[in-house]
Image (cartoon, rainbow, N blue to C red):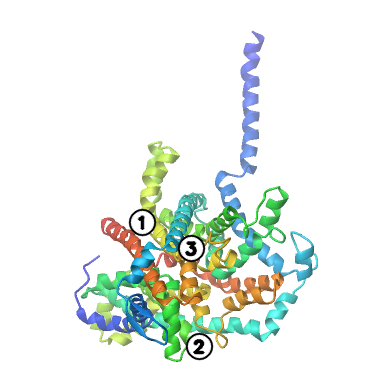
Amino acid sequence: MMEKPVYHKAWLLVLPMLALVCFSAIVPLMTVVNYSVQDTFGQNNFFWAGLAWFTETLASERVHGALGRQALFTGLILAIEVPLGIFVALNMPKKGFWSTFCLVAMSLPLLIPWNVVGTIWQIFGRVDIGLLGWTLDHLGVDYNYTRDTLDAWITLVLMDVWHWTSLVALLAFAGLKSIPDAYYQAAKIDQASRWKVFRYIELPKMRGVLTIAILLRFMDSFKIYTEPFVVTGGGPGNATTFLSIDLVKMALGQFNLGSAAAYSIVYFLIILSVSWVFYTVMINMDKKGT
Amino acid sequence: MAYAATDPVSSDARVARRRGLSRAWARVRPRGHVVVMVLYLLFLMLPIYWLVNMSLKPNSEILSTFSLWPQNLTFRNYVNIFTDASWYMGYVNSIIYVTLNTVISIAVALPAAYAFSRYTFLGDKHLFFWLLTNRMAPPAVFALPFFQLYSSIGLFDTHIAVALAHTLFNVPLAVWILEGFMRGVPREIDETAYIDGYSFPKFFVKIFMPLIASGIGVTAFFCFMFSWVELLLSRTLTSTAAKPIASVMTRTVSASGLDWGQLAAAGVLTILPGALVIYFVRNYIARGFALGRV
């Protein structure tokens, strides 16, 4: 592709978008920054607090706990969803009616409102009325996601795998479809094993889409709020209180503005820095690809 | 020597028979990837089936007997939703702000995406990444400031407030997807149109937009979807007049005890819009979810 011409007036085209994003992103974000460096005695009497809220947040055990649980959750679902998604993509029919059928059926969980995803699993896992809970109970497994920490975790991880594995699979499938048949024929002539075809043909072709998949799954699972909120409400105790749930509790529940604002900024920065690494990798691969 | 003469024949026959058998077996034996797909789709469909199952049962049956399909099939739960204003207005409110959001997002994203796909300008790369950071921002971070911002300008509990709040993640999404589609249109088309005397707005609407019509459709679908599935911001920014269906559902759980059948029916109805239009975007769905980067 040709180099794009330099044309600074293109800013005029970006301007409406920029104005809107300023209103919906920068103004609120500045409010957060503003709160994070001030303290109040009520009645809108604010005074400068410096970095006090930040030192408090960074030392707070509550935040450490939520961050730890969040990291564990994100790690777990990435470790399950990425290999499983690739595996499913490799088994999808390549063309014809069944290919379309699989695409549509697999996309369905992705389009369900997040609170309904929570509701589905809330019902599905209940021992008295849910298929999963009832079956486990009748098999003699002591399962109760509202009381037992491990069961709550298993339910949430299973729910996320159910909800989002298809995303990884769809992206991996899009990558697989871009491989020309000639590659496979060459591999056949060389009598390459199934593993070698995967390792040296399919995996390199999927690398770009997989980076995107991991990036998306990382940032979305790190922001997860609605689904665990509906299913477990953060419980039992604090066992499934992830960062967003904890933050909403602090900001809207306890109206603890300073702490919540400092918390928000630390939270945002974590997502931002990890995503930036992924993005840089992605852009570099784009350059190599063309 | 007798067997030396018969053996090859009989073993041939045996081999032939075995081959015939294995061929017959090969015809009926499910192949590995079919098994995998059937199991995976079953895993995906079971919870949804269970929700549909629950929605077709009266509440008494849900709590008293456990059955894999409704024993006393009833549509009462659905009838309730369509006759009770506090229920169906939830859907109406959701559809209003989701539509508003889709229109706003695409309207501002179209020229911006065109600029990104066609020109190099000061700070374009930083701006493009910075857009993505809005997609990364946890809604929980924005919940409180949004609440204060929209309260202070008197937009709290209006559809437009939720629509504007959702542009936070939908505008970046729209710009990224549209940019992906626009890159596929050769720039010679623009230049030819300008030589033919088209002005920019006329060219954009008359020639360029029809060329990326599928891209606009896909973008609209994804804006619609991501606004439709979001709960935290829409719940925070509304109380009664613009209350979305998602928050009607969460409040009913705590208020009326455990009307599971009703809840399930409401859930099924929220799945329908996505399920209805998904067929049209099936070939672009990976591209949409990947922000146009596939």
- Asked whether A17 or A46 is in front, the reply is A46
Name the quadrant containing residue A132. bottom right
Q: Is residue A92 visible?
A: yes
Q: Can residue B286 be seen in the rendering of this structure?
A: no
Q: Residues within 10 Å of mark 2 (few under 14, many from 20)?
A: some
Q: Which residue is drawn at the image coordinates 36% and 56% (left, top)?
A: A208
Q: Which mark is residue B158?
A: 2
Q: Is residue B264 left or right of residue B162?
A: right
What element does badge 3 sit on? Answer: loop
Q: Are marks 2 and 3 on the same chain?
A: no
| Tag 2: amino acid | Thr
Name the residue beneath numbered marker 3: A242
Residue B42: percent from the left, percent from the top?
A: 62, 55
Which chain is mark 1 on? Answer: A
In front: mark 2 or mark 3? 3
Q: Report how many numbered discs are placed on residues in the image.
A: 3
Percent x, y of residue B273: 57, 74
Against B291, residue A178 (above or below) is above
Do the residues at pointers 2 and 1 share their chain? no
